[in-house]
Amino acid sequence: MHDLGKAELDAVAEVLANPILTTGEWVARFEQRFADYLGVRNAVALTSCTGALHLSLIALGIGPGDEVITTPMTFIATATAIIEAGAKPVFVDVEPETGNLDVLRIEAAITERTRAIVPVHLYGQMCDMRALRELADRYGLHIFEDAAHCVEGARDGVKTGQLGNTACYSFYATKNLTCGEGGAAVTNDDALAERLRLLRLHGMNKNANDRHREGYQHWDMPVLGWKYNMDNIQAALLLPQMDRLDDNWQERRELAQQYEARLWDIPDLSRPKTLPGVEHAWHLFPVWIGAGRRDEVIERMQKAGISVMVNYRAIHRLTYFRDTFGFKTGDFPNAELIGDNTLSLPFYPNMPLEHVDCVIETLRDILS
Ligand SMILES: Cc1ncc(COP(=O)(O)O)c(C=O)c1O
């Protein structure tokens, strides 16, 4: 549930009073603000996290014949971006206690075709980026972090984007920072950032804002690019939210504590573990329902007027992945178990405590 209001309306009105609606000054301001927040050198604002992952792969020359290691416990976009780049997604099973890519299983999946690893910081808990970077460096691999769930989080003193070649973010409607649809890639590599900027706008070496500022000049297209540039309206929606980011994070952290204090004794219910050294971003609040009762719980919660979601069913069992790559049930048992049991509870800043109580009592009634 978004909390956009007057500050965002005012920011958009300011853009509309100016001639440049597309990529320009507001986008540059958002990029600076976002990069500063994460403590990285560059942010490149885009139209989605899917686009950010796709461009990251292409910018580093990954394509047909290459393999990219990732997790089956994610939204489909993590893997479809790899496929759109022309490469093959190679799934590795997840840690049973967190749902994150299991670093210890990766080495066995590396072949001479492997070029990159795409970890997903699931629900807002960061993967072990120090261990991943060490492994990737040992094999000469790139890392593109899918940080769609993890803007605010950290682990062992590292934030997202600081150790990956890029980290990719989503500003989709359900995210903590949103402009309806939007995304970004961040990187400490200045040359890579330049390449991402070129690739996000058809491969053109001048954009509309340059032409407006400097008067018409001929432009060139040195490389084939895509159309993934964020516009000023989207950036204006995001900028005021940066002021509230940490306060909203604190509210979600408190909400998570309220939930945890109430649900620990409900039968057949468990939770992902937050590991030592992790500062959780608290994007989602999933519970894991045992005894094969997850779908019954969904139905009964919805009948009681409580909206719940599933993040996610293990994606290798979806039709396209089974048909295209031959995956089957049993290939990634930890991801399958989580995917069969997981249920995300309502979770947003300012969620009234009576609603938390109502969600918990409904769950307890169903499961007791
Ligand atoms: C883990 C993960 N990766 C990627 C995406 C794709 O983000 P976008 O919709 O911005 O392309 C999402 C969106 O929900 C996501 O949750």
Image (cartoon, grey):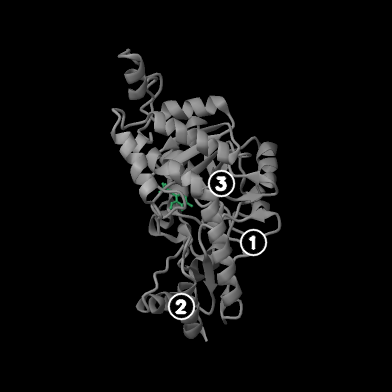
Q: Position of residue 170 (x, y in %)?
A: 45, 46
Q: Is residue 231 visible?
A: no
Tag 1 residue: 274
Q: Nearer the viewer, mark 3 or mark 1?
A: 1
Amino acid found under the numbered disc labelled 2:
Cys
Quick check: 13 left or right of 253? left
Among numbered discs 2 and 1, the one appearing first in the sequence = 1
Identify the residue at image location x=62%, y=60%.
Answer: 95
| Circle 1 SS class | loop
Q: Position of residue 6 (x, y in %)?
A: 36, 49
| Circle 3 SS class | strand
Among numbered discs 2 and 3, the one appearing first in the sequence = 3
Q: Are marks 3 and 1 in contact (CB under 8 Å)?
A: no
Q: Quadrant of the N terminus?
A: bottom left
Among numbered discs 3 and 1, the one appearing first in the sequence = 3
Q: Position of residue 15 (x, y in %)?
A: 33, 34
Amino acid found under the numbered disc labelled 1:
Thr
Tag 3 residue: 69
Q: Position of residue 210 (x, y in %)?
A: 37, 20
The residue carrying mark 2 has its beta carbon less than 8 Å from ligand 1: no
| Circle 2 SS class | helix
Kindly indicate the quadrant of the structure image that contains residue 141: top right
Q: Looking at the rendered structure, which numbered label has been put on residue 358?
A: 2
Q: Is residue 242 visible?
A: yes
Spatial CA span between label 2 and label 1: 25 Å
